[in-house]
Amino acid sequence: MKSTLSGTSVIGYARGTGSTAAGQAVHAASGAKLEPVYLSATPEEVDQAIDLAAAAFPAYSALSGKERGAFLRAIAEQIEGVVDDIAERGVMETGLPDARLRGETVRTTGQLRLFAALIEEGSWVDARIEKAQPERQPLPKADIRSMLRPLGPVAVFCASNFPMAFSVAGGDTAAALAAGCPVVVVAHHAHPGVAEIVAQAVMRAAVVTNMPEGVFSLLYGGGRAVGVPVVQHPVIQAVGFTGSRSGGTALMKAAASRPQPIPVYAEMSSVNPVVILPGALERGEAALAEAFFNSLTLGVGQFCTNPGLIFLPEGSGFVFLDRLKQLVGTSMPGVMLSEGIAKAYVDAVEAFAGTPGVETIARSAAPNGNGPGAAAVFSVSVRRFLEEDLLQGEMFGPAALIVRGTLEEIAATIPELEGQLTATIHGTEAELTAHSSLVQSLANKAGRVIFNGFPTGVEVCHAMVHGGPYPSTSDGRSTSVGTMSIHRFVRAVCYQSFPDSCLAPELQDGNPLGIWRMVDGELGR
């Protein structure tokens, strides 16, 4: 199937008309503008999409897990039918290679099917039953049962660096739809064509599976014109966001200022510290440098889990540094996702390079080795690192800061870091045991702690935690990857003294769905 792009929003089962131009995609490699021009949703169209979501919520939330699972599987199938279109348009809009676009599409369809399996099985609702004890003294006990129920319509903001996995039908959308929440997606200006292709696939899946109109919509337009009005609309009950700290905090403020404040689950900034212990260097410094370089430059460093901060014991690691210099010096700059990201990266790298006390370890020797997409590595002492707030910030791209100090100084520095998505430690099992307090400090600061690996590459599975303390995310108790993310879009509801026939199947005495439940404090089927 060849997708046709119209440049307008998807509102339920219809297409918007738009008014003013919201922007035009730019060919990442050449800078040429790509057709069509995308039109911003009008205020009336924003209201229409959200009103449709509100109307769809009662019917959609009442569907069984198998019915919603069939919808998610249909979305996956429809996306797979246009994977060639996604790859072709995605390469142009983002500069990402064809293989990356296809791989990210597989990840997207895989997480849709993972959520489908979760809700089809059904135990995720955390059903709890406390049976009545009418004879209990001094007071009788009522029959009390609870389970998780969907919040209501959810707004999802697409990410710039993941045009598939964190965008229109990505993790936030999959989790919200799985929970029973209609979704209104706000497209990202950097890849509007990919967004439209995927949105059309979702709309087709909704029609094929007879979902209520309004279960999904996609809106084009800027933050002030569309994004903030969506967040502040009284119907929207939660927000999913992946992007910059400034963007995330702006949405948090908009959501908090509503008459009814709502949660914003924002994934924002992280430098993902890596601690290298002596045992890791003894095992092979050159190999460690190569593995680090590959992680640092993967996707031109435009991953939220990019390892941008390395703690290296002083007086060691000379082979590691020499090999890293070679790799960085001979590397070629890559095409970055957008002009804005490229400029921000260059500005951040130059700010680090110009900071007193910071040494430039290596920069690309290519003709434009100081420009966008060029790798860079700097070094600084622990003392200077702690003195300068700038150095604890993120260079979103293939750049890293190496911090040198004693193991004691490094251990004392970890608690001073901001919240992170990941933290990594390289060493031996014996060192892991000997430095257990260091491991605990890293766990206090990050949502995922890695041993003898690197943080790029986030597995979509039941156990994954892709979140962390602020500012890596707005709520460190949640994850935006893996099936636990469904809990962001639900709330617990308790039913007291209800007749069995009037309860949801998950709470009925006979357990018709055969799910795991807690009955009088004991888990069982």
Image (cartoon, rainbow, N blue to C red):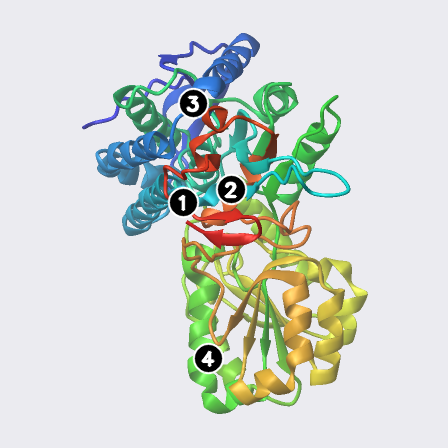
Numbered label attached to residue 515: 1
Rounded to the nearest angstrom, the CA distance separating label 1 from label 3 is 21 Å
User: Which tag, 1 or 3, sits closer to the chain's start?
Assistant: 3
User: Which tag, 1 or 2, sits closer to the chain's start?
Assistant: 2
Between 99 and 95, the one lying in front of the other is: 99
Rounded to the nearest angstrom, the CA distance separating label 1 from label 4 is 46 Å
Q: Residue at x 30, y 50 (%)?
A: 103
In this rendering, does residue 356 appear at all?
no
Numbered label attached to residue 127: 2
Between 321 and 386, the one lying in front of the other is: 386
Q: Which residue is mark 3?
A: 60
User: Which tag, 4 or 3, sits closer to the chain's start?
Assistant: 3
Which SS class for mark 3?
helix
Name above or below for residue 426 compared with residue 86: below
Q: Which residue is mark 4?
A: 288
Q: Residue 135's spot in the image, x, y percent?
A: 67, 40
Front of the two marks 1 and 3: 1
Bin the neighbour count of mark 1 within 10 Å (Cα to Cα): few under 14, some 14-19, many 20 and up.
Answer: some
| Residue type highlighted by circle 2 | Ala
Q: Are marks 1 and 2 in contact (CB under 8 Å)?
A: yes
